[in-house]
Amino acid sequence: MRHIYVILMLSFSVLGCSEQKSREKVKSILLAQLKNTHANQEWFVPTNTALKGLSVEQSNWRDSTNNHSIAELTSHLTFWNEMNLKSFKGENMSDFGVDNELTFNINNEKDWKRAVIRLDSIQTEWENAIEEAPLKKLNGWSSEIMNMTAHNAYHTGQIIYIRKRNGWWK
C-alpha cells in the first residue's frame, strides 16, 4: 500500500512539473509573438522596421480607392494595443465604447513622430507586462494576446505593401 502512495505522489509531482512547464511555454510563446510583431525580425517584418524612416507625407498617403494610410493603420494599432493593455492590467474599461472607424487617424508631422513613439512604447509595455504576469493570468489571456499579435502582423503587412507599392521600401 505504501508503494502505491509513493507512486501516486510521484505521479502528481511529475504532472505538476509538466503543467508548470506547459504554462511557462505559454509565456515564452506569447512573449516571442509580441516581440516578433514589435521589433524582432523573424519570419516577417515587425512594426518598428515597417514604420522606420517614413515622412509624414508618406504616412498620410492614400490610394485612389481610399484604403487606409500608414498613419491611420498606426493609430488603429496603437489604439487596440493600448485598450487591450489597459484591460489586461485590470484598468476600468466601463466607459469603453468606440466606433472602430474612429481609431484610424491622420497626423501632422509632430503627431506622426509621436504616433510612432507611442506604438513602440505600448508594444514594449506589453512585453514587460507579459514578463511580469502570473502564468494563470496568461493562460486566461493567451487567445486574446495571440489574436492581437496576428492583428498587428496583418496591418504591418498592409504598411509594407503601401511602402513597396510606392517605392518606399528597400
Image (cartoon, rainbow, N blue to C red):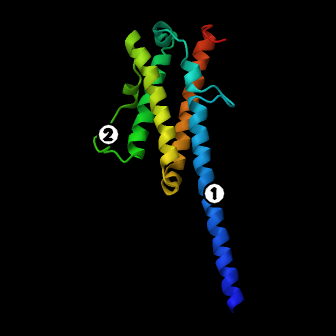
Tell me where residue 39 appears, x and y as whole percent: 58, 28
Q: Which residue is found at the position 48% from the left and 23% from the top? A: 73
Q: Quadrant of the N terminus?
A: bottom right
Q: Which residue is found at the position 56% from the left and 42% from the top? A: 146
Q: Which residue lies furthest to the bottom in this view?
A: 1
**Number of marks in the rendered image:** 2
Left or right: 141 in relation to 98: right
In this rendered view, identify the residue nearer to me: 133 or 44: 133
Q: In this view, does 57 lie above or below 52?
A: above
In this rendered view, identify the residue nearer to me: 3 or 102: 3
Q: Residue furthest left?
A: 95
> Which residue matches tag 2?
96
Q: First in sequence: mark 2 or mark 1?
A: 1
Label 1 environment density (alpha carbons within 10 Å; few <14, some 14–19, many ≥20): some
Tell me where residue 170 appears, x and y as whole percent: 67, 11
> Which residue matches tag 1?
22
Q: Which amino acid does label 2 sit on?
A: Phe
Tell me where residue 102 appears, x and y as whole percent: 36, 26
Q: Which residue is found at the position 56% from the left and 25% from the top? A: 47
Tell me the SS state at disc 1: helix
Q: In this view, does 147 lie above or below 113?
A: below
Q: Which amino acid does label 1 sit on?
A: Ser
Tell me the SS state at disc 2: loop
Residue 50 visible here: yes
Tell me where residue 83 appears, x and y as whole percent: 40, 37
